[in-house]
């Protein structure tokens, strides 16, 4: 099992282009459009309880994040069909991207060894990385809990609740 190399503050975030429901999403293109930066979050699987909680927290905070100049992108190994169902079922208002070979997750330190119910396994590491307008990491959060971590991001970035 490989131990993931996590991104650190000030490090350049690896660019990516991934498939979404509406075509593709690219970090560099989203950074060009964003006023402050992009929040990229990695989650294990659409429509599971923890991932649904996390996605709905981002959905419910989208207005405050957008008002503060941030765009949100969710990334998972799910196929686009699963992402479509998830988006429709939960009325998600930000792009979900498919990374089936986990190449982006690995490059961002969001796939590798982790503890799951007391056992070491290899899988998606629930993570959120905030990238500034300049393409550099300003807030890397790894092994986050699904519930409550969007509030933590808002607090760390000085963003009021929606």
Image (cartoon, rainbow, N blue to C red):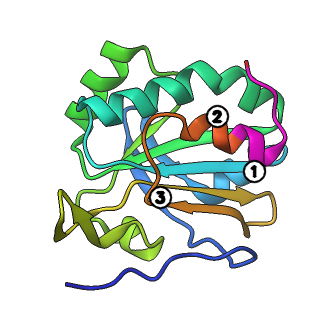
Q: Quadrant of residue 45?
A: top left
Q: Secondary structure at mark 2?
A: helix
Q: Secondary structure at mark 1?
A: strand
Q: Position of residue 128 (x, y in %)?
A: 54, 53
In the rendered structure, which segment of residues is drawn in magenta? 154-161
Instruction: Kindly report the distance in space between the C-alpha atoms of the residues bearing marks 1 and 2.
Output: 17 Å
Residue tagged 3: 17
Residue tagged 1: 37
Q: Secondary structure at mark 3?
A: strand
Residue tagged 2: 151
Is residue 101 visible in the rendered structure shown here? Answer: no
Q: Is residue 143 found inside the magenta-colored segment of the image? A: no
Q: Earlier in the sequence, mark 1 or mark 2?
A: 1
In-image side of 134 versus 79 (left or right): right
Q: Nearer the viewer, residue 124 or 32?
A: 124
Q: Position of residue 82 (x, y in %)?
A: 21, 32
Q: Is residue 86 above or below residue 10?
A: above
Is residue 7 visible in the rendered structure shown here? Answer: yes
- For image coordinates 26% across by 52% down, the residue present is 77
Q: Is residue 121 above or below residue 162?
A: below
State which quarter of the image contains the C terminus.
top right
Instruction: Kindly report the distance in space between the C-alpha atoms of the residues bearing marks 2 and 3.
Output: 27 Å
Labels 2, 3: front one: 2
Instruction: Kindly report the distance in space between the C-alpha atoms of the residues bearing marks 1 and 3.
Output: 16 Å
Q: Nearer the viewer, residue 145 or 118?
A: 118
Q: Position of residue 72 (x, y in %)?
A: 60, 40
Contact between labelled residues 2 and 1, with CB atoms less than 8 Å apart = no
């Amino acid at each position: 099992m490989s131990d993931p190399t996590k991104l650190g503050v000030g490090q350049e975030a690896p660019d990516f282009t991934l498939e979404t429901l509406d075509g593709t999403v690219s970090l560099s293109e989203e950074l060009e459009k964003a006023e402050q930066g992009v929040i990229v979050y990695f989650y294990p699987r659409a429509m599971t309880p923890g991932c649904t909680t996390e996605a709905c927290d981002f959905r419910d905070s989208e207005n405050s994040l957008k008002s503060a100049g941030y765009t949100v992108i969710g990334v998972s190994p799910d196929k686009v069909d699963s992402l479509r169902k998830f988006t429709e079922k939960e009325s998600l208002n930000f792009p979900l991207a498919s990374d089936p070979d986990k190449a982006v997750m690995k490059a961002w330190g969001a796939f590798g060894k982790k503890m799951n119910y007391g056992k070491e396994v290899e899988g998606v590491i629930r993570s959120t990385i905030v990238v500034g307008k300049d393409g550099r990491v300003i807030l890397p959060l790894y092994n986050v809990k699904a519930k409550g971590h969007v509030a933590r991001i808002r607090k760390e970035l000085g963003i009021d609740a929606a």
